[in-house]
Image (cartoon, rainbow, N blue to C red):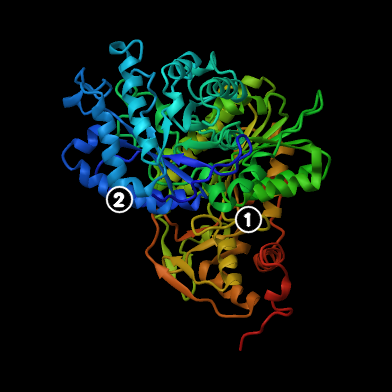
Amino acid sequence: MSAAGSSSPRAGNHRSYGFVEWFRPGEFERTEQILPGILASGASYLRTHLSWAEYLASGGEEWFDWLLPKLGKEIDLLPCIHYTPPSLSRTGRSSGAPSDLKSYADFVDHVLTRYGKHFSHIELWNEPNNLLDWDWREDSDFLLFCEMVGGAAYWAKHRGWKPVLGGPCPFDPYWLNLMGERGVLGVVDAVGFHGFPGTWDSENGTWGGWDMHLGEMRKILDRYNRDAEVWVTETGYSTWRSDEMEQARRFTKALHVPADRMYWYSWCDVPPNVPVQEGLWFDPRHYHLGAVTHDYQPKLLARLLMEGGVSRIEEVTQLATPNLTAGAAPLVITGGSGFIGSNIADSFLQEGEDVVILDNLGRPGVDQNLAWLMDRHGKRVHPVLADVRDLRGIEAAFSDAKAVFHLAAQTAVTTSLAHPIDDFEANARGTINVLEAVRKAGRNAPVIFASTNKVYGALEDLKMVEVEDRYIPIHEDVRSHGIGEDRPLDFCTPYGCSKGVADQYVLDYAKSYSIPTAVLRMSCIYGPRQFGTEDQGWVAHFLIRALSGEPISIYGNGKQVRDILHVDDAVAAYRAVLSNIERVKGGVFNLGGGPLNAVSIVAVLSEIEILTGHSLETGFGDWRAGDQYYFVADTRKLEQELGWQARIRWQSGLRHLAEWLADNRFGGRPRLPEKRKVRA
């Protein structure tokens, strides 16, 4: 018999953890997708089920012959043996006791012989006091259950394996004590506990805290078997309200409960087309308990674990919310840990303002921006780690706000095409949640919204001339001034739709509810504190790849023109709008670098080669959906009404960002030439 990592840490002080994942017969591809993520998370244990009913069904033996060796080879495996084959059940249901109680022990014996080298512990049944798993109506005194499980546990222990008694759900100390009186606790090595504080309504009135419930367990076990361990075999938190930070916090809490092991339920969300249990199909909480989504996209919990394990989670989740001084009226910045948000926050914090940073920290790296703000400005930074999709979770953050900058968003066109519903929830629903929270607060706080030039669509009607390194519009006025706010809206791609919906809601709240709002439809903003990716923040992404010596992918031919704007100028625009909000409320402004900062992608790459002193390896791919050949913002409205101007020219701004990246991401300036290279 062998198993990986079978040692158990001291109760209440363990740093190791496991996950629960149920694999259904035939899910070969899903298993191959899920297992690497579990291993990359640093998990030591995996709990899965070995259904007696499924094993005896057609193809069941072949399935478990593949599954259990595969899992047991990679991780300390805990198989949970439950579900009676209906043909052997006294009730004809998988929750019924078998007609021959000894047949369960015989099956356990078979499992140990066939698969036992892949694990050291074996769990006997799951949630036996739950009607869906054990039909206690036909076994009201649990005599059948005790005889069945007690015999199987005795035999497993006799053969050298360690039996674990399945955890009751909900926790019932009277049931557990009955197991002791009936002798079951005396023949097991551990007892499971299931608890999901904060997720199920049914637990709200009965949950007394980890210490109380696990303390009760320990007292009962000490009466019947002092050597038996307490294992939390199921705990978790559903992100059905998009509160991923709370899930990460609950995980951290569960790591330190007074138990010998902790299994988090679960690694992966349940696909939306799969019924969880009979009668529970429509409860969304059952479908969002995973650390990753059903299509394997990491939530905050999974990302932090894969970035740095437990210490990384604790580093992020320990960011507290300092109390505001009574009577303080802070600025609230949603997405305040992001690139633009952190720069806006810093500008106000330098002037002594209190700033609430509302952010879900969902994007890699943005917690570094929050840490930077807190290091620089201390107690005047008030982190609220929540998601704008969760109205209940964000309302309190706006109760005393004197102004709101709403920048929290899903920002990538590519992501919106892959996950249009998630894109809608973040951008459209998230925005109306912010507006409603402001309206409910009753302080008439101004709301300045970060919209996008994508609300104008692909601009396919603009006729272009293609020259050596760029597209140029034929229309002289567009060529001279750019795209104005009078351009008709033409939503394109789910991202354009969701941001466009949000844009229009923000403007309507000025009309319908007299909330002073304004919209800035932004072009490409770049600068320090940007963690650019291929999907969003392309200027920073190109520089990061260049400084790393990595190839750069270009979509389309690279002649697309954008008016890139340095973030310092963007911050000045946001501040100017707020300062004049009573005069410009209900207004829209295009925000970009304008014609003087209009530059093609290939021209930016050429300048990056000069900055870094070496040639770039580039590759070209297909055009992306909705990509504009040319977008330059006509900023005359901002200039004329607010006196704003883009002051930083793109070449000097690009060098500024390159120097910041060299210092803050690559450890110093030597990567950049001291002097500008002159081309022959």
Q: Which of the 4 image quarters holds residue 223? A: top right
Query: Given contact means CB atoms under 8 Å apart, are the residues at marks 2 and 1 in contact?
Result: no
Q: Is residue 116 left or right of residue 44?
A: left
Front-most of residues 476 and 366: 366
Residue closest to the far bottom: 680
Q: The residue tagged with tag 2: helix, strand or loop?
A: helix
Q: Quadrant of the C terminus?
A: bottom right
- The location of residue 661, given as percent across then percent down, is 67, 64
Q: Is residue 675 above or below residue 488?
A: below
Front-most of residues 253 and 298: 253
Q: Nearer the viewer, mark 2 or mark 1?
A: 2
CA distance for labels 2 and 1: 36 Å
Question: Which residue is under mark 2?
Answer: 29
Question: Which residue is under mark 1?
Answer: 530
Residue closest to the far front: 158
Q: Is residue 286 above or below residue 67?
A: above
State how many labels appear.
2
Q: Amino acid at mark 2?
A: Glu
Label 1 crowding class (10 Å Cα cut-off): few <14, some 14-19, many 20+?
many
Q: Amino acid at mark 1?
A: Gln
Residue 314 numbered tag: none
Q: The residue tagged with tag 1: helix, strand or loop?
A: loop
Task: State which tag comes first along the sequence, 2 or 1.
Answer: 2
Q: Is residue 537 left or right of residue 568?
A: left
- The location of residue 583, given as percent across then percent down, is 69, 34
Q: Is residue 541 left or right of residue 466?
A: right
- The location of residue 192, given as percent across then percent down, is 47, 29
Seen at 56% across and 74% down, the residue is: 549
Q: Judge whether residue 564 can be spotted in this image.
A: yes
